[in-house]
Image (spheres, grey):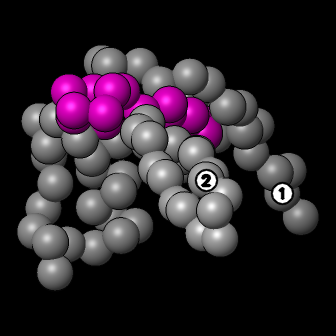
Amino acid sequence: MTNPPNVSIVLDSANRRAEIAELLNLCLGHKLTGQRDADYWAWKHERNPFGPSILLLAEADGQLVGVRRVESGEWRAESGGRRSEC
C-alpha cells in the first residue's frame, strides 16, 4: 500500500490562473460552455461587478488537485415578511 499524498490548502494566487483553468476544464468538461481560459477565470472571479471571489486551492505534492471558490455578491430573498441576505 502506498502512502497518501501530502495535501495542503492554500489561498489563491493570481499567477496560477492557467493551471486553475486547465484543472477545471479537465474536471468539469467543456462541451456545453466551451473551454475556459485564464482570462475568463480572472474576469469571473476577480473583475466581476460583485467583487472578487474567495478561492482556496488544494495541492498534493506541489501539484494543483482542487479548487474551491466562494463568489462574492449580495443575494436577497423575501419570504413572509422576512428578508435574508447571504
- Label 2 sits on a secondary structure element that is strand
Magenta highlight range: 45-59
| Of the two numbered discs 2 and 1 in the rendering, the one whose residue sits closer to the viewer | 2
Q: Residue at x 30, y 18 (%)?
A: 15
| Residue 38, x across and y down, in percent | 17, 37
Q: Does residue 29 show up magenta in the picture?
A: no
- Label 1 sits on a secondary structure element that is loop
Q: Residue at x 60, y 69 (%)?
A: 79
Q: Does residue 53 show up magenta in the picture?
A: yes
Reply above or below: 85 against 15: below
Q: Nearer the viewer, residue 64 or 85?
A: 85
Q: Nearer the viewer, residue 40 or 3?
A: 40
Amino acid carrying mark 1 in the image:
Thr
Q: CA distance from mark 2 to mark 1?
A: 52 Å
Reply above or below: 57 against 83: above
- Label 2 sits on residue: 83
Q: Is residue 42 left or right of residue 53?
A: left
- Label 1 sits on residue: 2
Q: Quadrant of the C terminus?
A: top right
| Residue 31, x across and y down, in percent | 16, 81
The answer to whether marks 2 and 1 mark residues whose Cβ atoms lie closer than 8 Å is: no
